[in-house]
């Protein structure tokens, strides 16, 4: 199998993995089960509380559920605003990463030359990495907040546990980071190495040798008489000297 064909298959696999990770990250935003808690010891009176970035919900064993959005945007803590911003950035960067990767892959042939396609794919891989890190920071920060409140003995409010959306988001973020890293590595080897080879630095000795022994293409070499050196007889222009040797019979014996 040729190297180009192997890289093409790797790009397809990384693109599919990143697309699946981005879909998993997007699916966690409308999901309410970021945190959940059960209240009540009797089955008939058990209530479930769960919440996400946008609302709080409650349901009971009869199947009736009610959700309420957060009442005021300015009254929310900074932690919640930061998690919202990071989650939205993860979705947006993942979308643009998919567009760039789809344009620059070797199997699509949309971008242009091989070097341009490699650079576009490299940009898509970096964008996927940014999306994965934004998602990982969001879910890890939220989980750290929930766990710290749960194990704190001085926290008197209602305690929650980790919801299913966090684990789904972690899985999607890991797919984005791993596949985006592989995509960046293979595309960067081709796109960045070709650009750096054109601008290879020339040492001083090499430049001096080129100036000394190499002539510019437009220069012409003019042949002339040799320079005068002391101790040598001058040569008259146009005069030719011929020396003849006399051979005898004894020379060939």
Image (cartoon, grey):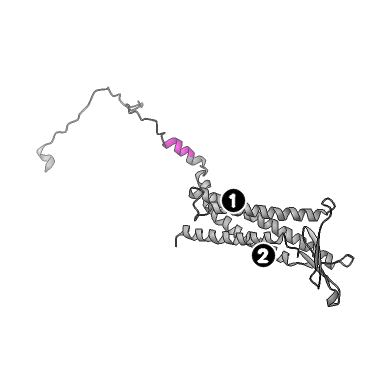
Which of 91 and 2 lies nearest the eye of the viewer? 91
Q: Distance between the residues labelled 1 and 2?
A: 23 Å
Return the residue found at the far bottom.
42
Residue that label 1 marks: 123
> Badge 1: few (under 14), some or many (20 or more) residues near its Cα, within 10 Å?
many
Q: In this view, does 100 lie to the left or right of 237?
A: right
Q: Name the residue under label 2.
A: 171
Q: Looking at the image, can residue 85 be seen?
A: yes
**Rendering coords of residue 195 (x, y %):** 52, 46
Q: What element carries label 1?
A: helix
Q: Give the range drawn in magenta.
A: 207-219
Q: Does residue 210 show up magenta in the picture?
A: yes
Write down the quadrant of residue 17 in the picture: bottom right
Q: In the picture, which quadrant includes the C terminus?
A: top left
At x 81% / y 53%, what residue is drawn?
Answer: 78
Q: Is any atom of residue 49 visible in this view?
A: no
What residue sits 73% from the left and 67% below the top?
164
Q: Crowdedness of circle 2 by 10 Å Cα count: few (<14), some, many (20+)?
A: some
Query: Residue 235: x and y, percent?
Result: 28, 24
Q: Which residue lies furthest to the left in this view?
A: 249
Q: Where is residue 117 in the image (x, y as percent from the top left)?
A: 52, 50
């Amino acid at each position: 199998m040729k190297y180009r064909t192997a890289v093409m298959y790797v790009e397809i696999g990384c693109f599919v993995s990143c697309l699946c990770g981005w879909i998993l990250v997007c699916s966690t935003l409308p999901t309410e089960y970021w945190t959940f808690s059960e209240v009540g010891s009797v089955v008939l009176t058990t209530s479930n509380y769960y919440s996400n970035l946008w609302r709080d919900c409650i349901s009971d064993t009869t199947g009736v559920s009610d959700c309420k959005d957060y009442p005021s945007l300015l009254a929310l803590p900074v932690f919640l605003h930061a998690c919202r911003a990071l989650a939205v950035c993860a979705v947006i960067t993942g979308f643009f990463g998919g567009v760039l990767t789809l344009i620059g892959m070797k199997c699509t042939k949309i971008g242009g030359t091989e070097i341009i396609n490699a650079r576009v794919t490299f940009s898509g891989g970096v964008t996927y990495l940014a999306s994965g890190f934004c998602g990982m920071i969001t879910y890890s920060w939220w989980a750290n907040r929930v766990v710290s409140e749960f194990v704190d003995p001085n926290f008197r409010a209602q305690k929650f546990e980790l919801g299913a959306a966090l684990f789904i988001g972690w899985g999607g973020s890991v797919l984005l980071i791993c596949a985006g890293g592989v995509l960046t590595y293979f595309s960067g080897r081709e796109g960045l190495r070709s650009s750096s080879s054109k601008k290879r630095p020339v040492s001083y000795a090499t430049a001096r040798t080129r100036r000394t022994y190499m002539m510019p293409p437009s220069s012409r070499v003019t042949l002339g008489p040799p320079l005068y050196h002391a101790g040598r007889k001058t040569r008259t222009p146009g005069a030719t000297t011929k020396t003849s040797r006399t051979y005898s019979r004894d020379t060939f014996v």
